Image (cartoon, helix red, strand yellow):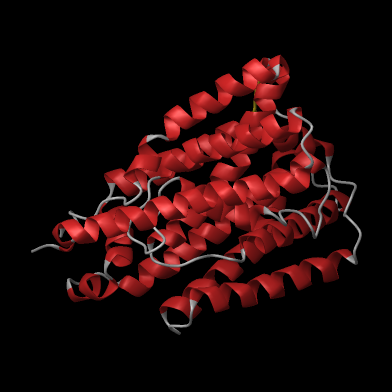
């Protein structure tokens, strides 16, 4: 029996919630539009789409880690460290007279180096060191946050090249923010990995039953490590895009994205026990939370209550998964 056949029977547990995501999204849009017509303004819709794009990119990485049975608590700190690293590199390179595409590419690559190192550290300690993902990523979160604060000295890094800001921060194509196309590229790449490649299915196999996957010849350590690297790099990409959006490198950027990325993944039906998760559901979940947040902002609800509402939604999603797991167990 092949390794893929061993895990073919495993399905997403919170089926009702995931199946209802499109309906929930449509209902949220309709109710918000009826309550506040400003929701349908083009500028507001583009803002919702932009925020959903940031969430989709970082949550897609979180999904990969959760699929192999872990969590990545460090993604928010990676966003901040990448922001600081990218801003520092761009200012330095611009000072040496570099400009245009060369400046953009080199600056972004330099900013992604810290993200890659954090991802490798997380992946190796979890896969080879067999240390708890929770403890490992809390440790790297603390280190990344401390480094970001150290390099900025508590002050944002300004003076970023206009080309960087105009291209990644304010760039549009056919009236659609550029970040939407970056997010679409990430989603398509992960969809291809998950649905069209054997390696993508191995991620689910490792998360579904690591011991069985190892016995069938899958190099489980490689896939676990790869998941953490993908998560860190996508968090780094989010940091670059957010830096271009806010116009500065900030050590506090992405402070709430760790919780939001896990929330998106849970609502999207990514199993807390590993082995289950689809990137297309991540997109729907990101759009739903972005519409919900926008609706509360339009209704002038204080931002501190947004977190409470998100928490309630996440608890409902976790309850749905737990109930689905019990039902699955009773049918077995």
Q: Residue furthest left?
A: 1
Examine the rendered structure and indicate whether residue 223 appears above or below residue 192: below
Q: Residue at x 17, y 56 (%)?
A: 331
Res 59 seen here: no
Q: Which of the 4 image quarters holds residue 20?
A: top left
Q: Is residue 241 visible?
A: yes
Q: Nearer the viewer, residue 131 or 27?
A: 27
Relative horizontal placement of residue 14, taking residue 209 as reference (left or right): right
Residue 196 in percent (x, y) is at 28, 44
Report the residue at 69% width, 14% height from top. 37
Horizontal and vertical percent position of residue 261: 57, 52
The foreground one among 50 and 190 is 50
Please tell me which residue is depicted at 54% across the width and 65% down the height of the picture. Answer: 72
Q: Quadrant of the N terminus?
A: bottom left
Q: Using residue 162 as the reference point, say whether residue 118 is left or right of it.
A: left
Q: Quadrant of the C terminus?
A: bottom left
Coordinates of residue 135 in the picture (x, y in percent): 56, 78
In the rendered image, residue 147, in percent from the top left (x then y), is placed at 77, 71
Q: Is residue 198 above or below residue 45?
A: below
The answer to whether 300 appears left or right of 130 in the picture is right
Q: Vertical placement of 34 versus 14: above or below?
A: above
Q: How many marks?
A: 0
**Image point (91%, 59%), residue name:** 155
Compared to residue 120, the image places residue 310 above or below, namely: above
């Amino acid at each position: 029996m092949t390794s893929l056949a061993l895990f073919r029977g495993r399905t997403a547990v919170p089926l009702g919630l995931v199946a209802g995501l499109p309906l929930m999204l449509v209902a949220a849009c309709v109710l918000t539009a009826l309550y506040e017509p400003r929701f349908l303004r083009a500028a507001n819709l583009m803002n919702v789409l932009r925020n959903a794009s940031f969430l989709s990119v970082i949550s897609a990485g979180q999904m990969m880690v959760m699929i192999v049975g872990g969590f990545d608590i460090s993604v928010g700190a990676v966003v901040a460290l990448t922001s600081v690293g990218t801003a520092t590199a761009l200012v330095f390179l611009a000072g040496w007279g570099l400009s245009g595409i060369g400046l953009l590419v080199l600056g972004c690559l330099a900013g992604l180096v810290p993200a890659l190192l954090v991802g490798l550290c997380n992946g190796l300690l979890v896969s080879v060191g067999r240390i708890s993902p929770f403890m490992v990523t809390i440790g790297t979160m603390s280190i990344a946050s401390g480094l970001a604060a150290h390099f900025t000295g508590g002050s944002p890094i300004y003076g970023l090249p206009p080309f960087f800001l105009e291209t990644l921060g304010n760039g549009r194509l056919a009236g659609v923010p550029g970040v939407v196309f970056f997010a679409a590229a990430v989603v398509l790449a992960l969809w291809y990995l998950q649905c069209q490649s054997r390696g993508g299915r191995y991620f689910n196999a490792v998360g579904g039953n690591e011991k069985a996957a190892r016995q069938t010849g899958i190099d489980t350590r490689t896939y676990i490590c790869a998941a953490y690297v993908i998560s860190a790099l996508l968090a780094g990409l989010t940091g670059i895009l957010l830096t271009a959006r806010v116009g500065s490198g900030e050590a506090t950027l992405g402070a709430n994205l760790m919780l939001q990325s896990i929330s998106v993944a849970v609502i999207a039906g990514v199993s807390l026990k590993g082995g289950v998760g689809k990137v297309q559901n991540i997109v729907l979940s990101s759009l739903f939370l972005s519409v919900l947040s926008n609706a509360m902002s339009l209704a002038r609800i204080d931002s501190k209550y947004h977190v409470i509402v998100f928490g309630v939604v996440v608890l409902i999603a976790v309850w749905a998964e737990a109930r689905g797991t019990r039902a699955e167990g009773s049918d077995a």
